[in-house]
Image: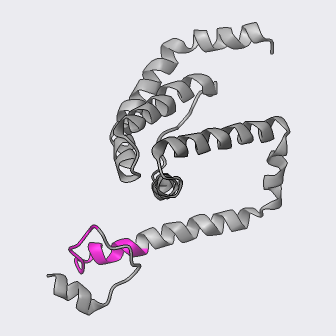
Amino acid sequence: MNQESSSSKYIANLSKDIPAGLVVFFVALPLCLGISLASGAPLFSGVITGIVGGVVVAWLSGSQLAVSGPAAGLTVIVLNGIETLGSFEAFLLAVLIAGVIQLGLGFLKAGMIGLYFPSSVIKGMLAAIGLILILKQIPHFVGADDDFFGEMDFSRQMGEIHSLK
């Protein structure tokens, strides 16, 4: 496919891509703001992330169906990165460098390295994350824990839970 037909495809689909991207942006905006607040980043970065994830990715993907948006699982990683590097600006520089490296590896077709990781390992890791999330919610679900924030321990002793009440 030549360059001219590729760009005309993007322009031809703008009437559908922009409204769809705006819907994704508005739906994801509260989550974008919450994640930026929780990760210690400026709130404006959450708005920019929502615009890029909702509008820009929808337009550039060239896909008929696309789901993009914030990944809440990265909140702790971003917070730790900002704290470790000392500032949000240093974190942005690290993300930029990582993006350049990723583009370089993409041009070198280095994605084949991923084939060396068994899919069972990836599925097991994701299942373990899901299991931990479910197990952490059980005390809240049965009403045994009224304190929803601040505790990072996996489990508490029943005496600690009753002393909170």
Q: Is residue 140 above or below residue 68?
A: below
- Residue 116 or 97: which is nearer the viewer? 97
Horizontal side of 159 relative to 40 (left or right) equals left
- Asked whether 84 or 80 is in front, the reply is 84
Left or right: 70 as drawn, with respect to 151: right
Find the magenta span and give its range. 135-149
Give the farthest residue toward the left. 165
State the residue at coordinates (49%, 72%): 131
Residue at 43% across, 34% down:
50
Q: Place residue 125 in its image quadrant.
A: bottom right
Name the colouring of the figure: one colour
Residue 75 at x, y = what percent?
A: 45, 54
Q: Is residue 41 above or below residue 23?
A: below
Please identify the residue farthest to the front as the structure is shown.
86
Q: Is residue 119 left or right of residue 28?
A: right
Quadrant in the picture for the C terminus: bottom left
Q: Quadrant of residue 33?
A: top left
Number of residue marks: 0
Q: Residue drawn 26% across and 77% down?
A: 142
The quadrant where residue 95 appears: top right
x and y, in percent, of residue 114 in the image = 78, 54
Look at the picture and state if 31 lies above or below 129.
Answer: above
Please tell me which residue is depicted at 39% across the width and 45% down the height of the picture. Answer: 36
**Image coords of residue 96 (percent x, y):** 62, 38
The N terminus lies in quadrant:
top right
Residue 19 percent across, percent down from the top left? 43, 20
Q: Is residue 46 magenta?
A: no
